[in-house]
Amino acid sequence: MDIEDKRTISRQYFSRERLAEHHFRSFNNFLDRGMQQVVDEKATIDTDIGDKEGEEPVYVELGDVRVVTPRVREADGSEELLYPQEARLRNITYSAPVFMEMAVIKGGEEEEERVVDQTETKIGRMPIMVGSKKCNIANFTDPDLIEIGEDPADPGGYFIVNGSERVLMTSEDLAPNKILAETDTKYGDTIEIAKTFSQRRGYRALVLCERTRDGLLEVSFPSVSGSVNFVTLVRALGLESDEEIVHRVSDDPEVVKFMLENLEAAEVQTTEEAIETLGVRVASGQGKNYQLKRANYVIDRYLLPHLHEEGIPDEDVRINKAYYLCRMAEACFELALERRDADDKDHYANKRLKVSGDLMRDLFRTALNKLARDVKYQLERANMRNRQLSVSTVVRSDVLTERLEHPIATGNWVGGRSGVSQLVDRTDYMGVLSHLRRLRSPLSRSQPHFEARDLHATQWGRICPSETPEGPNCGLVKNFAQAMELSQNVEDEQKLKQELAGMGVEGIPGFGGLEAPADD
């Protein structure tokens, strides 16, 4: 290949579209699928209307959501198309109206349900990424861009809020729904730990399975103080017999020996006893019925939430959870027997990146929940005053708009994170490109974290080895390598599972058998 060919390839690669491609692809995917998925998760807004005797229950059903292109409402009430340069000059937000189908429905299961009011209503405004598919200048030619005051070389990939250009920082995190085994030193003893960050619908739960110095396994997960005995927990999930528990962990004689120690020390022998024991832990001092109800709720809601699948019976989900815990136990024992090495948290296979679309999905989820609470309040108030229940009067669009714009304007994101959105570095053209291709680690800047700051062999070809700031951010704020392409999530997970099940792969919940679920 001669030098001219290399120049042609380089010019093609480093085009305006390519350098911020990961931002566009992620945000476009959020507009196409992510928003609708969040609405489908919510599905309905329940109200307290109907709790009193003689009152018919009322709820709101949510339908399709759509976003148009950015508009601005002028003083005379007319709506005009808005371009990025105008938003910068007028210090306004480059955002588009969001419309959603909503229906107020009266009547419960006993009475016949009927639609009181159904309409597509404006629920708020969504900030739009410059250059994304919903941007008004997305398909403009260079002369068209120059005519409206835009720079044809500008890469886009950022938002304009109150006239300021804000870029969402790609953030690096440990891979969710994957078992990571490691050793820890507690009280002078080395203990083995298998952990997984179980994530579903924006909720993230850390589940730990650790082998204590006595050789006994204990599991800790949210909403339960302290640790729960491993055998007690898997029995509560439906794995009752000693033989089945041992077989699910491992058939290796050394591991079986360790498991027999755990079974001998077991406090309970049946599923009923296990749930009772768990109930005493999660609701001590309460009545027995409440304890059982609370124990069932905790293991269904907070234990490994990522294993919940739509359309799969609760018993099957619980068995899947038991199998997953057995996999975690096996990882602990293999680490103790030195059959495997501890997982490297800095290995790039154990990391995932959150790009603009993922961050906007988290934001939209909280904004929609806030809007749902407000709609519930407005409906109940209208009902108390005997007013007509209609969608258009109960939806206040500024509730959603405020929740979407404020975090982008300040950088203070949901979940207590700060610095997620930053002012675009306009020092020079290279500064803009560098800022769009930057990623940050959530680790504390005040701690040494030597290994996390170090170059890792798996960063080769992915992360630039030299572009990182000096000082406390060194090694925690990194930049993508020049020709790095960021792969996206699988678009249709169910289709992929069906394909794998058709090939005879076991361990896929809901498709051909209920073996131990896959890590990720």
Image (cartoon, helix red, strand yellow):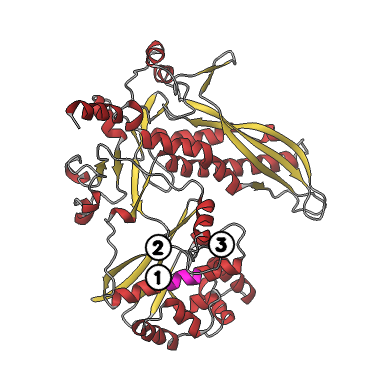
Q: Earlier in the sequence, mark 2 or mark 1?
A: 2
Q: Which residue is mark 3?
A: 511
Q: Which residue is mark 1?
A: 328
Q: Is 305 inside the magenta-drawn segment?
A: no
Q: Which residues are magenta?
A: 321-327
Instruction: Point out residue 80 in the picture as x, y percentages from the top left corner.
Output: 54, 16
Horizontal side of residue 156 vs 366, given as left or right: left
Image quadrant assignment for residue 310: bottom right
Q: Amino acid at mark 2?
A: Thr
- Report x, y in % for residue 461: 24, 45
Indicate left or right for 336 with 81 as reference.
left
Q: Earlier in the sequence, mark 3 or mark 1?
A: 1
Work out which residue is located at the far front of the displayed protein and give it.
1
Above or below, 511 against 98 in this view is: below
Classify mark 2: helix, strand or loop: strand
Q: CA distance from mark 2 to mark 3?
A: 23 Å
The 10 Å Cα crowd at callout 2, few under 14, some 14 to 19, many 20 or more, is many
CB-based contact (under 8 Å), mark 2 and mark 3: no
| 56 is higher (above) or lower (below) than 177 | above
Tell whether position 325 is magenta: yes
Among the two numbered marks 2 and 3 on one chain, the one whose residue lies closer to the N terminus: 2
Identified by mark 1, the residue type is Met
Mark 3 packing: few (<14 Cα in 10 Å), some, or many (20+)? Answer: some
In contact (CB < 8 Å): disc 2 and disc 1: yes
- Which residue sits at x=26%, y=33%? 434
Query: Mark 2 sits on what residue?
Result: 196
Evaluate whether residue 271 shows in this view: yes
Disc 1 element: helix
Give the number of the disc on residue 371: none
The kind of residue tagged 3 is Phe
Residue 401 as seen in the image, left or right of residue 341: right
